[in-house]
Image (cartoon, helix red, strand yellow):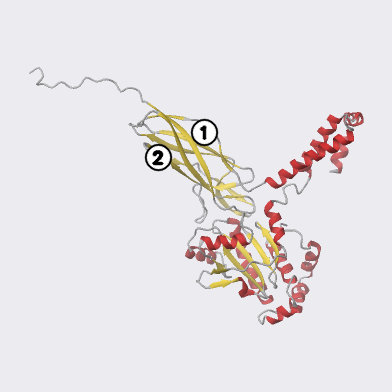
Amino acid sequence: MKSLTSYFTSFSWARRVTLRRDPVVLIVLAMLASLLLVFGLNPISHDPTPEDLAAARMQGQVAHEFVLPDTEGKMVHLSDFRGKAVVLNFWATWCTPCKVEMPWFAELQKQYASQGVQILGVDTRDDAAMEDVAAFAKDIGVDYPILVGKPSEQNAVANDYGGMPVLPETVFITRDGKVSEKALGLRTKNQIEESIRKTLYQGGSQQQIVEKQSAPAVGEVLRSPVESRPEILNSVRSHGQGSVRE
Amino acid sequence: MMNPTKSFLVALLLCLPLAGQEQFARKGPTVTMSPASVASLQRGKAGSVELHFVVGAGFHVNSNTPTEEFLIPTTLDLDAPTDIVIGRVTYPAGKMASFPFSPKQKLSVYTGEFAVSVVVRPLAEVLPAEYAVHGTLRYQACDNAACYPPKRLPVDFRVRVVKGPRPPRRNPPQSPHVHG
């Protein structure tokens, strides 16, 4: 920005025009400056989108309770996982980027299960039959629960979590049931893992966590992953909570 | 006359809403239909109508023959008036492309402009006039990092049915009994 400004003002004609202080010229310059800001120089000119803003607004809100059947017909409530950090990954069989990240979620589920992370895939805006959804997930190595449902049930859950204007969308829910982050679109495995770690750090009193027998004690959750990989802690510290899409 | 500094500030202020509009007006993928000219068709004869569509920059839609089972193909469904028959719909071949979300995988997609050809045949008894054909283009779009739920784009075009050239006049065969 600075270099462009100096380049612009270095022209003698530009200096003369500026010195003349012609209001019309100034108006034109102002419009030009705005256009440059919008289209060229501002690196976040296309962000945040309305979807990003809506996602940011969800942070800190209590996650909506829902019940949906899994691919084996078992009814799954979100509250079944109280005390755990829950990752809701909204996806569809027609979504190729979703297919890219689902095997990562399967790996992260195995990696973080002992620390109280539960990943749930929510099939959304999808006309595929339940058997096809199950086969699709199995083919790409997914072994965490995949929640399906009638279109009306799918849509109701999707609407509670912001309408799912794009897929994939992933909602990270803390142990105390609050949305820590909603991520739109495909991200890298490292970014997803970082969000899981942040979600583990946030929310949930020690008492709540201890009450849940299956969940590890808070000290264990806070210490063990970081001790083994200090670079993650540094990354989490440097990023903070603000960014939705990284 | 207004102080130039003030003019500058006023202009800047006037431009700010424009910036805001751009920032918040982006709403997912856009597929639009280019205006179609009225196709002239002879009654009783099949003719072809080309419909042109434009996929917004930065997006792609699956072609009519996607490479993977669960991908949603782009399809055109038309509802013609009585006595106008919609025949074969021909889709262009998709462009094989890979995307940042899956660089090793090639997908069959449409980007930019693509044309779909439709065979339309007015029946021989239809009255010469202009007729509207309505329908929808179903598509499912993605960008480089996300996909958007399937959408339906209204499709409208008109055909003008005209009389065909008069058939050559033939004398009816004479009965041998007439002069007999």
Q: Which mark is residue B87?
A: 2
Say which residue appears at 86% left-offset and 39% top-offset.
Answer: A5
Q: Residue B36 carries which label?
A: 1
Say which residue appears at 78% left-offset and 67% top-offset.
Answer: A231
Residue type pointed to by label 2: Gly
Q: Is residue A138 left or right of residue B118?
A: right
Vertical placement of A206 versus A134: above or below? below
Say which residue appears at 83% left-offset and 37% top-offset.
Answer: B10
Give the quadrant of residue A190.
Answer: bottom right
How crowded pointer 1 is (Cα within 10 Å; few <14, some 14-19, many 20+) is rated as some
Chain of residue at mark 2 = B
Give the quadrant of residue A188.
Answer: bottom right
Vertical placement of B142 versus A134: above or below? above
Alpha carbons under labels 1 and 2: distance apart: 18 Å
Chain of residue at mark 1 = B
Q: Can residue A10 be seen in this view?
A: no
Q: Observer-nearest residue: B54 or B152? A: B152
Say which residue appears at 33% left-offset and 31% top-offset.
Answer: B125
Label tally = 2
- Callout 1 touching callout 2 (CB < 8 Å): no
Residue A49 percent location from the top left of the image: 70, 51
Q: Which badge, 1 or 2, is on the more N-terminal residue?
A: 1
Residue B145 percent location from the top left of the image: 64, 53
Q: Do the residues indicated by labels 1 and 2 lie within the same chain of the protein?
A: yes
- Secondary structure at badge 1 equals loop
Residue A17 percent location from the top left of the image: 88, 29
- The image quadrant where one finds the N terminus of chain A is top right
Residue type pointed to by label 1: Ala
Q: Is residue A20 left or right of residue A210?
A: right
How crowded pointer 2 is (Cα within 10 Å; few <14, some 14-19, many 20+) is rated as some
